[in-house]
Amino acid sequence: MQHIRNFSIIAHIDHGKSTLADRLIQRCGGLADREMSAQVLDSMDIERERGITIKAQTAALQYKAADGQIYALNLIDTPGHVDFSYEVSRSLSACEGALLVVDASQGVEAQTVANCYTAIELGVEVVPILNKMDLPSANPEGAREEIEDVIGIDAADAILASAKTGMGIDEILEAVVARIPAPVGDPTAPLQALIIDSWFDNYVGVVMLVRIVNGVLKPKDKISFMATGAAHLCEQIGVFTPKSQPRVQLSAGEVGFVIAGIKDLADAKVGDTITIAGKPADKPLPGFKEVKPQVFAGLYPVESSEYDQLRDSLEKLKLNDAALMFEPEVSQALGFGFRCGFLGLLHMEIVQERLEREFDMDIITTAPSVVYEVLQRDGTVIHIESPSRLPEIGKLEEVREPIVTVTLFMPQEYVGPVMTLCNNKRGNQLDMTYHGRQVHLHYEIPLAEIVLDFFDKLKSVSRGYASMDYEFKEYRAADVVRVDVLINTDKVDALSTICHRSNARYRGREVVAKMRELIPRQMYDVAIQAAIGAEIIARENVKALRKNVLAKCYGGDISRKKKLLEKQKAGKKRMKQVGSVEIPQEAFLAILQVEDK
Ligand SMILES: Nc1nc2c(ncn2[C@@H]2O[C@H](COP(=O)(O)OP(=O)(O)OP(=O)(O)O)[C@@H](O)[C@H]2O)c(=O)[nH]1
């Protein structure tokens, strides 16, 4: 076990995490050069294009160190975004060390900070690396100071590197061996294996990436899952180099994959502990948490006839995304669709994008909302995942909204703007502490305010330097109301939102104004109104088109006419016919564009 090193790479987006991982794999001979064409660790196209790693993967490398010994280095990939913070914490808790990659020309940026704190909290050894030293603009001294000031760890022996040219790669591998502790664990104890990640493979079913903490796991072992209680037969184990390679056993300290004929991802939850059914460990490893969707939105097919296809697509996506939830929903305006639950806004965007790209679906998404707890006059308590389902005022005793505790990190100069933002979002400050130039703030903020656009605003007011994390605290009574939108006097249920009474009029007016810009002119005048209960609080008109598009340019050339019609059809794709009015996707999300008061 003293020849094993388990480590992750943490970095802000674009600081070179994937490039460095590729270099390390290449240097250790994991893949031939021609296989290195693409960044191997980001397996999904969409990840490559968005540049965000959403599914953790790993590589087991063999490295012959300067001391002549051969070491088994397990590189464990971590996702980088706050929506996936639980997965990050599970990946890091499977490691003894983490390489903190900082772009020497950019310095420390927001995302590094939260992940780095998670690593420090978990007792993981952090090795700072200043990457992109080949760039003329590299400023290692500045970056070093920022690591010390902002993150607060010693950066005196940060390694100067370039994942592009290969500079510093050997030094990094030597540091992994010398500075990161070997795992500790008892191979003779009952099995405790932490599930770091799990995903669905069409051929073998669920694949689990595990860190063996204690004990030994072999094929044919009957394993059980301590959180779910499910039992399965272990069929195959092995490691990724990054290609999969079978092994006859995985022992304490090692990282590898397990296949056990599992069909449902829900049986193999990230963070759960695997043990041997006949000889179980007396307790699971700490830190298991059920991930629950926090953000809900309606997803509807643009063509009603594609409902079944949308359901099939969502089912396929769910195979590989245990956090995605969905159930059928009917909207008067949009017809049959699904109410879907996501971990956060990025998760929602990824699902939406995959539905469109991988499954070729045209969908309309409604504005994201949170779950409200409603105490009705008759004493019953219900949970509302869709604003249109909020009972009428006469039946309501109390509406409670989810409150989260938000932890924010930022350099001192951004404290003012960040506090203003939190206050605008109905935040309640809990405390503020200084750590050198770095400030930690704790706030309680209604989740509904966070899901709208908090993350983007936080980034813009802090120029990307502030980072955040949040955790559900409780449901708390709130004076919220539903703002409805009427189009040509018909209420469009998919456009209803719930918001605090103090903001309701303002938001209603702004949404209607935004929608006027977003809804194209049609053959008739379109009236857009906002209402609270029976009271109309705002109204705008979209004036009718005077002339028909075709009339203008049609001069007998039929191919031109066809082209125009095709163009119109393509442009129509993300439009939904509501009554006699065509509403584009953007208009359903107009609430996201409303600025704070
Ligand atoms: N000049 C230079 N460019 C580099 C170096 N390392 C990475 N890059 C470039 O920086 C960009 C981002 O690198 P990635 O490895 O994709 O960064 P990442 O941190 O994995 O980013 P995400 O996957 O988006 O989180 C790419 O265009 C790389 O080619 C380096 O040492 N020098």
Image (cartoon, rainbow, N blue to C red):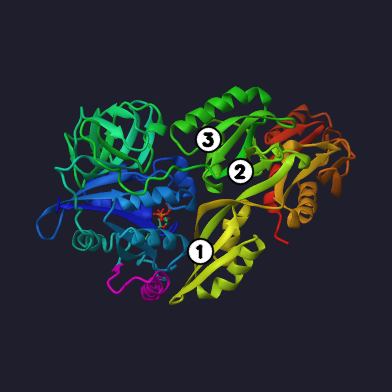
Viewer-proximal residue, 346 or 375? 375
From the image, which quarter does the C terminus lie in?
Answer: bottom right
Indicate the quadrant where residue 436 lies: bottom left
Mark-to-mark CA distance, 2 and 3: 13 Å
Residue lying farthest front? Answer: 379
The segment highlighted magenta reads 138-159
Camera-near label (2 vs 3) is 2
Asked if residue 45 can be seen in this view, the reply is yes
Q: Left or right: 163 with respect to 316?
A: left
Ligand 1 closer than 8 Å to the CB at disc 1?
no
Mark-to-mark CA distance, 2 and 1: 24 Å
Counting residues from the N terminus, which is met first, the one under dot 3 or under dot 1? 3
Residue type, numbered disc 1? Leu
Viewer-proximal residue, 139 or 351? 351
Does residue 377 sit above or below 114 in this rendering? above
SS at circle 1? strand
Q: In percent of the image, x 62 and y 25: which residue is there?
A: 307
* Image quarter where ligand 1 lies: bottom left
SS at circle 3? strand
Viewer-proximal residue, 272 or 120? 272
Residue type, numbered disc 2? Val
Tag 1 residue: 408
Q: In percent of the image, x 30 and y 68: which residue is there?
A: 160
Q: In percent of the image, x 30 and y 46: which residue is there?
A: 285
Q: Is residue 416 magenta?
A: no
Q: Position of residue 31 (x, y in %)?
A: 26, 43
SS at circle 2? loop
Q: Left or right: 530 with respect to 366?
A: right
Mark 1 residue crowding within 10 angstroms, few (<14) / some (14–19) / many (20+): many
Tag 3 residue: 325
Mark-to-mark CA distance, 3 and 1: 28 Å
